[in-house]
Amino acid sequence: MTPLLEVSDLTVRYGTRIGCADVGFDLAPGEVLGVVGESGSGKTTMLRSVAGFVAPDAGRLHYAGRDLRTMAEPERRRLLRTDWAFVHQHARDGLRMGVSAGGNVGERLMAGGARHYGDIRATAADWLQRVEIDPARIDDRPAQFSGGMQQRLQIARALVTAPRLVLMDEPTGGLDVSVQARLLDLLRGLVREMGLAAIVVTHDIGVVRLLADRLMVMKDGRVVETGLTDQVLDDPQHGYTQLLVSSVLAA
């Protein structure tokens, strides 16, 4: 199968400090790649560089056969509005807090060319229901929602255009354990139902075990181990991966 996303030798430097170095992977359509590592491992830098939020110093980034590094900025922005989606750790970073719940979802539809108000509102209401938010709250502002509901609203906003690639940065971070479990069940269902390709960055091994087909472990900006998720977690080869897994088992 031809990869949807191809990354090789991706390197980001912050002065003398390395954000990530020589990172490489392919992502097939419909595949979920989990990326784990402690804070400072380079996983978020890598993700933000793929998304275009951070310019890489070196490396190759190809999406659906197109070179992302030479792509014109308007075309890249259009990708992020339609074909791609980014789910932030903090929902407020992915929502417009002064706009209603329905407006948040509808804005992404309008950015993709939708114009019929009735259709946009009906689609927004449908997506609120899909992420377990009462459609009767379509005119409420995000500030009136709990943290878990805000994250579900961000997911509705991100997925309403049926993107082919979703980039998630600690999507369950900062939420209560019970809220995390409910959100993970929702994400797993939507990813499988929609056949999404996704990169999920997290420090939580439980998240990748539930969501990811394949796992990449990063330390000090570099990839130290990669493979099928169950294979890596059940039989880790690198000492750092063994430490991550054992710390979960000991908890």
Image: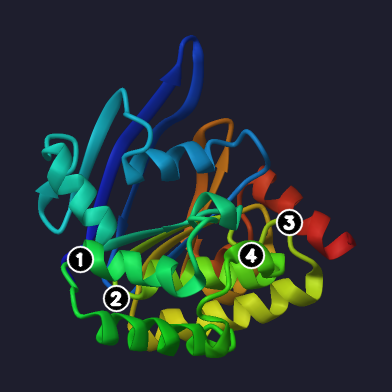
Along the line of sight, the residue nearer the viewer: 33 or 153: 153
Mark 3 or 4, nearer chain start: 3
Mark 4 or 1, nearer chain start: 1
Residue 202 vs residue 110: left or right?
Answer: right
Where, quadrant-wise, is the C terminus in this rendering? Answer: bottom right
Say whether marks 1 and 2 touch (CB < 8 Å). no
Q: Secondary structure at mark 1?
A: loop
Give residue 233's mark: 4
Give residue 162's mark: 2
Amino acid type, callout 3: Gly
Mark 1–mark 2 distance (CA, rounded to whole Å): 11 Å
Residue 78 vs residue 104: left or right?
Answer: left
Residue 65 visible to an observer of this rendering? yes
Q: Position of residue 137 (x, y in %)?
A: 57, 82
Tag 3 residue? 174
Mark 2–mark 4 distance (CA, rounded to whole Å): 31 Å
